[in-house]
Image (cartoon, helix red, strand yellow):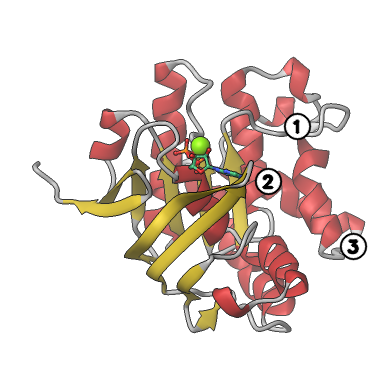
Amino acid sequence: MSSFKRGLRNLGRNRSRNLLLILNRRRCCGVVKNIKVKEVSKEFSFGGQIVAALREATFDLEAGNFTCIVGPSGSGKSTLVNLLGGLEGPTAGEIFVGKIPLHRFSEKELTLYRRQSVGFIFQFFHLIPNLSAQENVELPLEFNGLPKARRAERARQCLEAAELGPERFHHNPKRLSGGEQQRVAIARALATNPPLILADEPTGNLDSRTGKAIISLLARLAREEKKIVLVVTHDRDTARQADQVLSIKDGIVSRVEHTA
Ligand code: ADP
Ligand code: MG
C-alpha cells in the first residue's frame, strides 16, 4: 500500500473522533457534499474608487471533485478563494457550504469556520520558520485544543499522507526544498480534516516536476478523501487534470467545458 493510501486510511480512522468532535459542536459540519455560490459579488473601495473584484459569480463545487480556477492576474481568483475560505464576506449574493449560509456568518463564526472547515495552501507556503515540519502541522490542532500527544500523532499521519519522508519531520522549513515545504503546507491543511481545501497558486513557486506531484496529490485528496478541492492555477496541464474548470476574467466566472 502506498504511503499516501496508508496516510489517508489513518486520517479516516481518526475522522469520526476528530471531525465530529470538533465540527459538529458548531454549525459547520464535517462532511460537506457541496458548496453553492449564488450571484456572489465582492467590491472593494480603494482610494475613493469602487473596485468590483467579483461580479455575480454562480457555480457549484462538489465533494470528490478536483476543481481548478484559471484566469489572468487581477481577475479575482484570490478574492474568490478568500470568500470561500471565510477570510472575507461577500458584498452581495449567497454562499452555502452544505446547508450552512456562510454569507450570514458573523466574524466570530467565520473564524471558527476557517479553523475547522478550511485548509489553506498558499504559493509561498507560509510556514512558521522557527518551527519544525511536524510542529507546523500541529499548530492548527493546538488552536483546536487537541492534547499534545494526539497532536503529534495526527501531525505525523498528515505528513505521511502528504508524502514527506519521516526523516524530514523535525527539519525547519529552511532545511526543506520548495516541494517539501509545500508538502508540509498540505499536511497542515489536512490536520483538522477539513471538508474544503483551497490552494491559491500552490505550484507557482515550484519546478514543473515537483508542481505536477503536488497537483496529483491534491487531485487524489479530492477523489480518494472526497474533499472539495479548489486550486488556482496558471497552468493548462494542471487544469486538464481537473474534474471542473472555472475561468475568471474581470471578476466574471464561467465554467469551461472539457474539450478532452
Ligand atoms: P487575482 O488573484 O486573480 O490576481 P485578486 O482577487 O487578487 O486577483 O484581485 C482582483 C481585483 O480586486 C484586483 O483589481 C485587485 O486590485 C482588487 N483587490 C483585491 N483585493 C483588494 C483589496 N483588499 N482592496 C482593494 N482592491 C482589492
Ligand atoms: Mg491572486
User: Please, what is the three-letter code of the amino acid marked with disc 1?
Assistant: Phe
Picture coordinates of residue 108, whole percent (x, y) = 78, 72
Above or below residue 11? Residue 234 is: above
Mark 2 residue's CB less than 8 Å from ligand 2: no
Of marks 1 and 2, the one in the foreground: 2
Crowd rating for badge 1 (residues with CA inside 10 Å; few <14, some 14–19, many 20+):
many
The structure residue drawn at horizontal position 39% and vertical position 37%, both measured from the top left corner, is 216
Q: Quadrant of residue 176?
A: top right
Q: Which one is nearer the viewer's eye here, 112 or 174?
A: 112
- Of the numbered discs in the image, which one, if any, rests on residue 169? 1
- State the residue position of label 2: 188
Q: Could you say which is closer to the camera, residue 79 or residue 207?
A: 79
Residue 37, x across and y down, in percent: 40, 69
Where disc 1 sits, the SS reads loop
* First reached walking from the N terminus: tag 1 or tag 2: 1
Say what secondary structure mark 2 lies in.
Answer: helix
Element carrying mark 3: loop
Q: Amino acid at mark 2?
A: Arg
Residue bearing the label numbered 3: 147
Residue 154 percent coordinates (x, y): 73, 54
Q: At label 3, which amino acid type do we have? A: Pro
Q: Residue at x 46, y 51 (%)?
A: 52
The answer to whether 2 appears left or right of 25 in the picture is: left
Marks 1 and 3 close (CB-CB < 8 Å)? no
Query: For this view, does 56 lie left or right of residue 198?
Result: left
Quarter where residue 38 is shown: bottom left
Question: Marks 2 and 3, how far apart in space?
Answer: 17 Å
- Circle nearer the viewer, 2 or 3: 2
Q: Is residue 88 above or below residue 260?
A: below
Q: What is the CA distance from the residue labelled 1 to the residue labelled 3?
A: 19 Å
